[in-house]
Image (cartoon, rainbow, N blue to C red):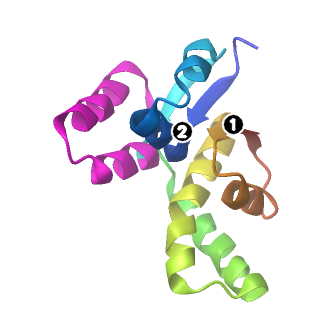
């Protein structure tokens, strides 16, 4: 489907940068790529070398950026609260999940598919809020 909108999760780019794991997949992906501002922030936070910084800058420059809305931020808090009540996650786990919840909610806004290698967390999120997901 050439007209599907794709948002890559941070996990795809990290694996790509570290070991070039998804080069062929990324090259062959069929759809309209959008970057999540959350993903770009996570990547920028971890970029410690110039090639990594250049990679993040190129992503931001080459594909439009989508950002969570105020409603997404509020809803993300409610979802994380429910996860805490249901599963008793500690604050560190909830903090780790927060950005993934924001990525998922933003993708949902645009009818986009999230492509990730983080099956466990995104399938958990999808059990609280439906969105399109593809796991590599």
Nearer the observer, 16 or 53: 16
Question: What is the chief secondary structure element of the magenta stretch?
Answer: helix
Q: Are marks 2 and 1 in contact (CB under 8 Å)?
A: yes
Residue at the image position 49 percent from the left and 45 percent from the top: 10
Q: In which quarter of the image is residue 71?
A: bottom right
> Which residue is denoted by mark 2 in the rendering?
12
11 over 112 or under it: above or below: below
Q: Quadrant of residue 65?
A: top left
Residue 124: in magenta span:
no
Nearer the observer, 24 or 88: 24
Dot label at residue 136: 1
- Residue 40 drawn at (x, y percent): 38, 42
- Residue 54 drawn at (x, y percent): 23, 30
Dot label at residue 5: none
- With 20 as the anchor, is 57 left or right in this view? left
SS label for mark 1: loop
Q: Quadrant of residue 5?
A: top right
Residue at the image position 47 percent from the left and 33 percent from the top: 16
54 over 97 or under it: above or below: above
Magenta residues (range) = 38-65
């Amino acid at each position: 489907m050439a007209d599907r909108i794709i948002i890559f999760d941070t996990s795809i780019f990290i694996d790509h940068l570290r070991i070039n794991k998804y080069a062929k997949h990324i090259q062959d992906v069929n759809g309209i790529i959008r970057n999540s501002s959350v993903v770009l922030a996570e990547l920028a936070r971890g970029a410690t070398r110039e090639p990594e910084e250049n990679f993040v800058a190129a992503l931001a420059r080459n594909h439009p950026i989508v950002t969570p809305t105020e409603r997404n931020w509020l809803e993300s808090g409610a979802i994380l609260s429910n996860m805490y009540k249901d599963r008793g996650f500690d604050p560190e786990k909830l903090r780790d999940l927060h950005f993934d919840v924001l990525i998922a909610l933003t993708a949902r806004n645009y009818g986009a598919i999230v492509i990730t290698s983080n099956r466990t967390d995104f399938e958990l999120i999808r059990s609280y809020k439906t969105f399109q997901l593809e796991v590599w």
